[in-house]
Amino acid sequence: MSIKSHRINTRKKQRKKMSENATHHVVMLPWSAFGHLIPFFELSIAIVKLGIHVSFISTPKNIQRLPKPPLDLSHLLHLIEMNFPSSIDSSHLCGGEATVDIPFDKIQYLKLAWDQMQNPVKEFVSKLQPNWIICDFHAHWTVEIAQELHVKLMYHSVYSASTIVFFGPPGRIRTPTSPEVLTSPREWVNFPSSVAFQQNEAIAFYQDAYIENVTGLRDIDRLASVIDGANALSFRSCYEMEGEYLNLYQELIDKPVIPIGLLPPEMPERRHVDESWSKTFEWLDAQATKSVVFVGFGSECKLSKEQVFEIAYGLELSEFPFLWTLRKPSWAIHDHDSLPLGFCERTSKRGKVCFGWAPQKEILAHKSIGGSLFHSGWGSIIETLMFGHTLVVLPFVVDQPLNAKALVDKGLAIEVKRNNEDGSFSRDDIAKCLREAMVLEEGEELRIKTREIAKVVGDLKLHHDYMKAFVRFLRT
């Protein structure tokens, strides 16, 4: 027998043994935003590797856009494509199946479409009889399914523990009667914390989460119902990062609160990067160590022309080398319309703007990257801190402002100042924050702390131990 044949037979035996040992089955039900789909997918991969069967439910277009799972896990990971019922009015969704495909004011119709998935999901769960349903905030109807079919239910938060603590236990989640209530740290937080929205952020969040939409529900009621009906909660977090918030939430809801670890990505290999990026990486190779600012605001932040231009002018004023990954905004006809006239020419010797998709993990892992200017989404925070970069945060939507305050509290970020009433920010303040984070003496403590936390965030053994403890809980 050849060495290759022996390896194939060994892998087959290992897969067969894993399948025989995988007596537990979990159904995953993430919300249709890629900031939710990807963390749920990564959690699925992690628990499958430890011998748990997973059925991951989403719509066809979303399933097709997920990363390809390792072939040796295909016997345990089942990607279940469910179409939205033909009865729904799809005109509002514009053919989209995820928030990135749909204008912000139409996202409520995506929730309406998911509400009509209750019966197909119930039928699937009834036939499968899994041990757990692990769901997101949107699927409030899974509480009824789990209770009727005697399946345990878990709410998995893709948000930080500090964010969920801010909203409070189910009884408190529903109570804010005005945006002003959201502008102060909460009274149940029994340690120093500045986590709260500023005025303009509170108004935007209140209108989105605390006002009934076309589904007949408020988003905050969905979250409260799922948390209230769940047997347990899990967080992509760890005690080393958010111990005080995790412990407090356990006290507030009096049910198991389980950190699964930070699920840091394995160190990416540059040889796997698309050939079209070779010149950009050659440019990074030519830059001094820790000298370049990475700028990225993801696909969910739909920035206005004024906001994009102000960021551009701030980068220009800072005089730092930068690499900016930018998706062409809807208000721009061509890529070059997305930036101030002459910006690329004026900054061409020290900066690069790359439009469309970018290999973010590989970029962040490069030795020349020293800081990041970004939105402070929880997943991006983890990726960025893993490499010890100093953080300048400019939050825009949902949990991002709360994450920003929590990072500042811990001395792990500098937040760009915003006008309290309209949320505007200035190019001068962006440049000032970047200088402090990257080189000025007053930013030295920040740089020390980010290097220290990088050791925790990037400790693969630590987070694998969290995952093993989580799987043990699923098996109980």
Image (cartoon, rainbow, N blue to C red):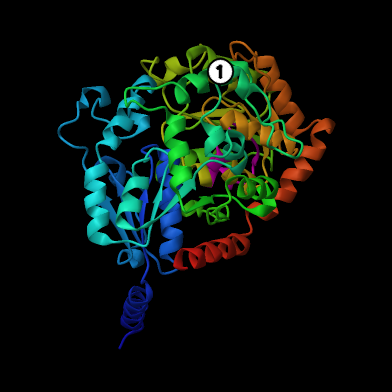
Image point (53%, 40%), residue name: 159
Q: Which residues are magenta?
A: 362-380
User: Farthest left residue?
Assistant: 86
Kindly state the secondary structure of the residue where label 1 is placed: loop
> In this rendering, would 468 be left or right of 76?
right
> In this rendering, would 358 be left or right of 415?
left
* Residue under numbered circle 1: 178
Residue 376: percent from left, percent from top: 59, 34
Q: Is residue 436 visible?
A: yes
Image point (84%, 32%), residue name: 441
Name the foreground residue: 376 vs 165.
165
Name the foreground residue: 279 vs 307.
307
Residue 16's place in the image compared with 87, above or below, is below
Residue 256: percent from left, percent from top: 55, 55
Disc 1 residue type?
Ser
Q: Is residue 441 magenta?
A: no
Residue 474's place in the image compared with 61, above or below, is below
Name the foreground residue: 337 vs 427.
427
Quarter containing the N terminus: bottom left
